[in-house]
Image (cartoon, rainbow, N blue to C red):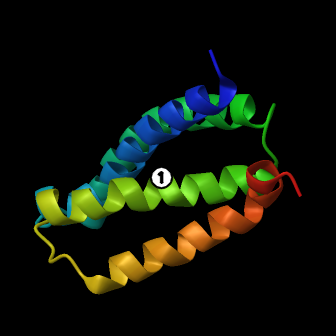
Amino acid sequence: MNPIITSIGLLLCSNVFMTFAWYAHLKSMNHKPWIIAALVSWGIALFEYLLQVPANRIGHTVMSVGQLKILQEVITLTVFVPFSIFYLKEDLKWDYLWAGLCIMGAVFFVFREKLTGA
């Protein structure tokens, strides 16, 4: 299978776990002591790392570390925005669009050689 597609798939799954580990406790455990939320989050984060580490190793066979990082940020925002809207019931903000456009600019510059052949 294509290492870029494999890396993206694993990073998408990893980001779902990461987003839940970082933010779900704000809704589901907001009345529990922070240490309980932290321990639960660490448990969830284990699954994130079990996907993220192989994703980066596979991706690094065809991408630079900078490209992997920007790809990760795009995926993070792609997962985070729907999570914050549908799970946390946050309002959709224009700032998400502007942030996404800035990240797309970063994608262009970090992948410019692959995109334009320059």
Which residue sits at x=55%, y=60%?
A: 73
**Dot 1: within a 10 Å radius of its alpha carbon, few (fewer than 14), some, or many (20 or more) residues?**
some
**84 relative to 53 in the view: left or right:** left
Residue 81 picture location, percent across and down: 30, 64
Q: Residue furthest top?
A: 1
Q: Is residue 33 left or right of residue 58?
A: left
Residue occupied by mark 1: 75
Which residue is located at x 71 percent, y 35 percent?
A: 59
Residue at left offset 65%, top offset 33%: 4
Residue situated in front as seen by the camera: 35 or 7: 7
Closest to the observer, 61 or 110: 110
Any part of residue 36 in sight: yes
The residue lying toward the viewer, choosing from 67 and 83, is: 67
Asked where in the image residue 90 lies, by quadrant, the reply is bottom left
Percent position of residue 108, x then y: 67, 64
Q: Secondary structure at mark 1?
A: helix
Rendered position, 38 above or below 1? below
Residue 22 seen from this side: no
Q: Residue placed at 44% from the left, 33% from the top?
A: 47
What amino acid is found at the position of numbered circle 1 in the picture?
Answer: Ile
Looking at the image, is 60 positioned above or below residue 30?
Answer: above
